[in-house]
């Protein structure tokens, strides 16, 4: 993590939600590799501590705050604690999300729908609101990135709620980018394609080869493929990009939804 040729985010402070595994874990490690002090957020403390240990073992800076992104009190506490510990917030990566129970709409419960929307859509809204309040009050420029999905513009059977949550996120950040822009804060989404995460593996390993075969690059993505782009969006190299949902899918969607 102490690559002298890197360190593009030296001394910056980044909050990463859903940092205990998958894309969130990889992105937290990448933020730390680039010199940022990383605040790891999630509902379960044990996975966050494992991520923190990996970062610290590589001489990075990691701090753990357990909390539920769909709870406004928890979100406000995360932001306030970050300010107390580090004095600033430069970046937020809203990655916490669930796929939900899925299934056809006729089989899906109202409770499952509410939980998915609360975490995938309300959660980022709450965190963006809290972070922007703190950043604007401190006159602190920065960048916020959220995890959307290729399913925001596509769908498979059983993704009615999930696709809606991600499409809502894409629409939401366009308005927020207009509000945040005058304060020199950029807001973007990254839309992963098929990525090798615990969420994907829950469907069984057998689905991976046929999915990989459909991508132009002939493979599914890794969490690091997404992490590198998410962190890049927070660097000055992406200084003129805001209000965008950037598809990172290895060419999976080139032929269109299938």
Image (cartoon, grey):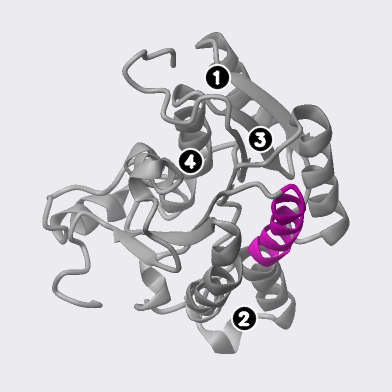
x and y, in percent, of residue 147 in the image? 49, 57
- The residue at the point 45 percent across, 61 percent down is 189
Mark 3–mark 2 distance (CA, rounded to whole Å)? 32 Å
x and y, in percent, of residue 95 in the image? 55, 51
Residues drawn in magenta: 123-138
Q: If you read the primary sequence from the N terminus, does the residue marked by circle 4 or circle 3 appear first?
A: 4
Q: If you read the primary sequence from the N terminus, does the residue marked by circle 3 or circle 1 appear first?
A: 3
Mark 4–mark 1 distance (CA, rounded to whole Å)? 15 Å
Q: Nearer the viewer, residue 107 or 92?
A: 92
Q: Nearer the viewer, residue 127 or 174?
A: 174
Residue corresponding to mark 4: 22
Q: If you read the primary sequence from the N terminus, does the residue marked by circle 2 or circle 1 appear first?
A: 1
Mark 2–mark 1 distance (CA, rounded to whole Å)? 39 Å
The circle on residue 55 is: 1
Mark in front: 4 vs 1: 1
- The residue at the point 20 percent across, 51 percent down is 209
- The residue at the point 36 percent across, 50 percent down is 238
Residue farthest to the bottom, as pictured: 106
- The residue at the point 63 percent across, 69 percent down is 121
Residue corresponding to mark 3: 40
Mark in front: 4 vs 2: 4
């Amino acid at each position: 993590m102490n690559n002298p040729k890197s360190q593009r985010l030296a001394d910056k402070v980044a909050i990463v939600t859903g940092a205990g595994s998958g894309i969130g874990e990889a992105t937290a490690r990448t933020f730390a590799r680039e010199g940022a002090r990383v605040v790891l957020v999630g509902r379960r403390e044990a996975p966050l501590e494992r991520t923190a240990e990996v970062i610290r073992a590589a001489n990075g800076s990691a701090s753990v705050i357990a909390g539920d992104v769909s709870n406004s009190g928890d979100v406000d506490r995360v932001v306030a604690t970050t300010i107390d510990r580090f004095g600033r917030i430069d970046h937020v990566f809203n990655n916490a999300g669930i796929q939900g129970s899925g299934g056809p709409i006729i089989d899906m419960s109202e409770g499952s729908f509410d939980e998915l929307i609360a975490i995938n859509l309300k959660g980022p809204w709450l965190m963006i609101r809290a972070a922007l309040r703190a950043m604007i009050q401190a006159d602190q420029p920065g960048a916020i990135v959220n995890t959307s999905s290729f399913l925001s513009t596509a769908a498979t059977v059983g993704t009615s709620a999930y696709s809606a949550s991600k499409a809502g996120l894409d629409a939401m950040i366009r308005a927020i980018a207009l509000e945040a822009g005058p304060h020199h804060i950029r807001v973007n989404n990254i839309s992963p394609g098929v990525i090798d995460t615990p969420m994907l593996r829950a469907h069984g390993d057998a689905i991976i080869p046929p999915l990989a075969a459909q991508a132009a690059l002939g493979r599914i993505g890794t969490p690091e493929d997404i992490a590198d782009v998410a962190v890049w969006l927070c660097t000055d190299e992406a200084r003129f990009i805001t209000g965008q949902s950037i598809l990172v899918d290895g060419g999976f969607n080139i032929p269109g939804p299938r």
